[in-house]
Image (cartoon, rainbow, N blue to C red):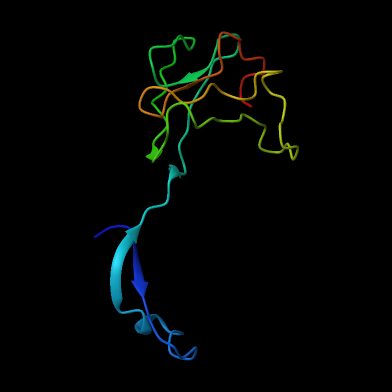
């Protein structure tokens, strides 16, 4: 099976549960939720930006964000320049935060505001 196995070792002695082989009772699987790494998206300067959905994007269609356990109405994205070390960079002016996820949890929008960054950033 794919994923991360959870093993259990029960002992009253501290020195027993210290090596992986001591945890022989496999009782479940752990799934890490969140977006999958390495995804790329494109937005067009002067147009609103969105990921997935039937939203205008300057003629560019972005797929939905791919991930595990993405939650509509709860998850959000933040756009920031890679070299910007501040927690809330400013490439979209006051609209750095996306909408809350909608659809199946992988659709995000930055509203009707056009992208102000120069092309290539």
Q: Report how many numbered discs are placed on residues in the image.
A: 0
Residue toward you, 53 or 45: 53
Residue shown at 53%/16% (left/top)? 49
In which quadrant of the rendered view does residue 67 lie?
top left
Q: Is residue 82 above or below residue 15?
A: above
Q: Is residue 64 above or below residue 12?
A: above
The residue at the point 65 percent across, 19 percent down is 95
Q: Find residue 56 and report its horizontal and vertical position in percent.
A: 46, 9
Please give left or right for residue 114 compared with residue 4 in the image. Answer: right
Locate residue 116, reporting x and y percent.
67, 14
Image spot of residue 1 (x, y percent): 24, 60
Q: Quadrant of the C terminus?
A: top right
Residue 32: percent from the left, percent from the top? 42, 51
Give the side of residue 46 with respect to residue 58, left or right: right
Kindly identify the residue that appears in the image at 39 percent across and 36 percent down.
Answer: 66
Residue drawn at (30%, 63%) of the image: 28
User: Dividing the picture into quarters, in which one does residue 90 lie?
Assistant: top right
Q: Quadrant of residue 27?
A: bottom left
Residue at the extreme front: 12
Q: Is residue 111 above or below residue 96?
A: above
Of all residues shown, which one is farthest toward the left? 1
């Amino acid at each position: 099976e794919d994923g991360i196995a959870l093993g259990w070792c029960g002992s009253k002695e501290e020195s027993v549960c210290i090596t992986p082989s001591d945890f022989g009772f496999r009782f479940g699987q752990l799934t890490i939720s969140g977006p999958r790494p390495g995804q790329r998206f494109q937005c067009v300067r002067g147009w609103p930006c969105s990921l997935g959905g039937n939203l205008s994007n300057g003629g560019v269609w972005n797929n939905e964000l791919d991930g595990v356990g993405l939650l509509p109405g709860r998850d959000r994205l933040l756009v920031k320049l890679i070299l910007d070390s501040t927690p809330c960079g400013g490439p979209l002016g006051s609209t750095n935060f996306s909408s809350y996820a909608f659809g199946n949890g992988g659709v995000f929008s930055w509203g009707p505001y056009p992208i102000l960054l120069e092309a290539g950033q």
